[in-house]
Amino acid sequence: LELIVLALWTDSTRCITYMLGNSNSRIVFDFLGITEQHHYLSHFFRNFSRSNLESLLKISLWHMEKFDTLLTKLKSHQEGDGTLLDNTVVLYGCGTSKTHVGRNYPLVLAGGKNLGLKHGAFQRVEDERPFNDVLLTLLQRVGVETERFGDSEGSVDQLMA
C-alpha cells in the first residue's frame, strides 16, 4: 500500500490495480487465526455456522482496515489544491454479487472530490445495471472521452456531484 501511495504521489503512474487476496482462491487467512478457505466461508448461506460467519467477518474487517490505511495515506499528501485522495479515484470492491455476474456488486467509492464525484451517501444503483456503467462513469471523470466500456449502457449520474 505504501508503494501505491508513493507511485501516485511521485506521478510515476495514475492507474493501479491491486488485489489483497483472491476470494475465489484457496487462500486461508491463518495469520488471522482462521483455518477455512475464504471462498468456502463466503458461501456462508450454504455453510452456515456462527464460527464461519465470524471468520468471514474477521477477514472483511482486515480488508477494510487495509482500505482505511490506503485512504489515510493518500489523504496525508498535499497535491495541488487538495490532497492526493482528492485527485485520485479509489474503487474498493469484491467479486461477490448475488449471482456471480457483473451486477449487484457491493462497492465503496472514495476520493476524486476534485474530479466531480459525490461522496458521503449510500447509493443504490438499479439492480440490473451493469457494473461497467460505474467504470464508464469513472473513466469519464478522469478525462477519458468514451461513451461505452464493455457492456455499459451509460454513465451513472447519481455518482457525480
Image (cartoon, helix red, strand yellow):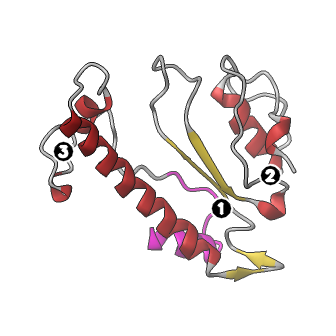
Q: What residue appears at the point 60 percent right and 47 percent down from the top-left corner?
A: 108
Residue at 30% across, 25% down: 43
Q: Which residue type does callout 2 highlight?
A: Lys
Which residue is tagged 2? 118
SS assignment at label 1: loop
Instruction: State the residue in front, 124 or 30.
Output: 124
Vertical side of 86 occupied by 38: above or below = above
Q: Which mark is residue 28?
A: 3
Q: Position of residue 130 (x, y in %)?
A: 67, 23
| Residue type indicated by callout 1 | Arg
- Distance between the alpha carbons at the discs numbered 1 and 2: 20 Å
Report which quarter residue 49 is drawn in: top left
Start-end of magenta stretch? 1-17
To which residue does mark 1 refer? Answer: 14
Packing grade of label 3 (10 A; few <14, some 14-19, many >=20) is some
Measured in 3D between alpha carbons, the distance from the residue under mark 2 to the one under mark 3, in whole angstroms, is: 36 Å
Earlier residue among tags 1 and 3? 1
Give yes or no for contact between labels 2 and 3 (Cβ–Cβ under 8 Å): no
